Amino acid sequence: MSWASLVSGASAAVSPDATPEAAEADLQIQAQPSNFWTGFWTRETMLGDMGGLRPWLGKYGVTFQLTETSEYLANVRGGLGRGGAYDGLTTATVGIDTQKAFGLPGGQFNISALQIHGTNLSTRYLGTLNTASGIEAEGTTRLWELWYQQSFLDKRVDIKIGQQSIDQEFITSQYSATFINTMFGWPALPSYDMPSGGPAYPLSALGVRVRGQITQNLTALAGVFDGDPIGNNDTNLRGTNFNLHNGTLFIGELQYAINQPSDGEMVGMNSNKLPGTYKLGVWYNNNRFDDQRFDNTGLSLANPASTGVPQSHHGNYSFYAVADQMIWRPDPDEPRSIGVFTRLMGAPGDRNLVSFAANAGIVMKAPFKGRDDDSVGLAVTYIKVGNHVHDLDLDYRNFLNSPYGVRTQETTIEATYVYQVTPWWTMQADAQYTFNAGAGQNPNDPTQPLRNTFVIGVRANLTF
């Protein structure tokens, strides 16, 4: 099982590095006194204040979060075969506010670890490019992130250095995170085109990220990271391969936010102004990348006379755009609302499996009266393979003079409902249908067709 297929997802866990103030806000919540044995169904975390441990740690600026995501998904039609699989992810995160810990203002330290368990439905039963779950990965216990962040200029600028998973900050979408399919988290294009799938769940890479608030509405992010999170050690399952020897990944993003609440203001204070966030970004990797069709002499790799050594290209890049926009909120004092999202990205078709990827969807919050924390959503994700991949398949068909699957594109539609059982426990019902599975080619036997897949399942999220 290749790392590229395992890391093609977004993380289901939530990192505290989304905003510089996130750990402080969480600390204030966790520090509220409560009895460990009462309010079990109404408190924010299953274990509450852990018998006073959380408030005591909070005095010293320390926060601790433990979450579990468990799911069972089953393929009931098409693909490589019918069947189901359980997989799960436990995430442990410790944060330290350096102001409270030892008097250094604006500092935040973060360390997190993953325990991945279960089996991989997509590899075993689907064979699709749009893999079914964002937590699918090889079972292991590993270090995930290890970084220090320091803010300056009244929190208008911050710098983060260390082992980072860039899917926590770059190319993110608020509304797409509702869905289970991998490509609604860490999208298809970087999943397949970046070396080892890029520094995204369950991987991370050493690097530096700078974030600055240019205006009240405009924020810029820029990062420099190791170019391959696996590097020279593809057997590293513990996340301790602190590699700096496999090229460099550069990524930059502009974020424009409209109608956002001010500090201390409730989200629904102004019903006439619906919030939205719009992002434009680019990434560049200076490694060398194999051509997807031609060898080093210009012959097709399908040609029997080919050397079998792909033509080499210097560098790889992609441009992308992300939009999240609330489009309906009938009452500013109630949570009911509708939001939409879309993400578009493109890359060169000669050196990449995926040359274009897109996803879009709609999410309704509080769809029924009395279910303020529930969400229901419908979304679609699309993958177009590169022109050299498509043409190579045509070459194989011609040279073999026999049936051979020619890859083109693949589309998955997902419908989901998130049910808030308690503040610390959600259940999510999910259904996914994939058209033109495998983009038109069976990964186990290119001469045989692959029927469209239909996946149903349920996911539980618990915050301890």
Image: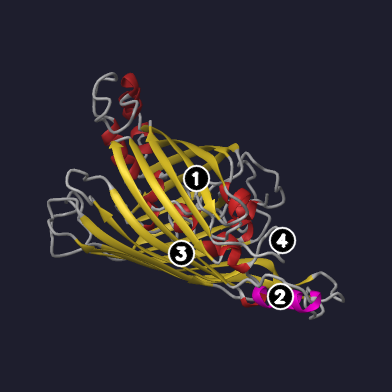
Instruction: Give the amino acid at mark 4.
Output: Asp
First reached walking from the N terminus: tag 3 or tag 4: 3
Q: Nearer the viewer, mark 2 or mark 4?
A: 4
Q: Are marks 4 and 1 in contact (CB under 8 Å)?
A: no
Q: How is the image coloured?
A: secondary structure
Disc 3 target residue: 381
Q: Closer to the camera, 208 or 356?
A: 356
Task: Give me the C-alpha separation between circle 3 and circle 1.
Answer: 18 Å
Q: Quadrant of residue 102?
A: top left
Q: Closer to the camera, 29 or 418?
A: 418
Crowd tier of the residue under label 2, counting other residues whose Cα lies within 10 Å: few below 14, some 14–19, many 20 or above:
many
Q: Position of residue 440 (x, y in %)?
A: 61, 68
User: Can residue 163 be found in the magenta stretch?
Assistant: no
> Which residue does the image show at 27% across and 30% down from the upper left?
31
First reached walking from the N terminus: tag 4 or tag 1: 1
Task: Give me the C-alpha separation between circle 3 and circle 4.
Answer: 25 Å
Instruction: Judge from the rendering whether residue 327 lies leftward or rightward of residue 77; answer left or right.
Output: left
Is residue 291 positioned above or below 340 on the image?
A: below
Disc 2 target residue: 392
Crowd tier of the residue under label 1, counting other residues whose Cα lies within 10 Å: few below 14, some 14–19, many 20 or above:
many
First reached walking from the N terminus: tag 2 or tag 3: 3
Q: Nearer the viewer, mark 2 or mark 1?
A: 1
Instruction: Judge from the rendering whether residue 401 lies leftward or rightward of residue 143; answer left or right.
Output: right
Instruction: Give the amino acid at mark 3.
Output: Thr
Disc 4 target residue: 445
Q: Which region shows up in magenta? A: 389-400
Instruction: Judge from the rendering whether residue 237 lies leftward or rightward of residue 143; answer left or right.
Output: right
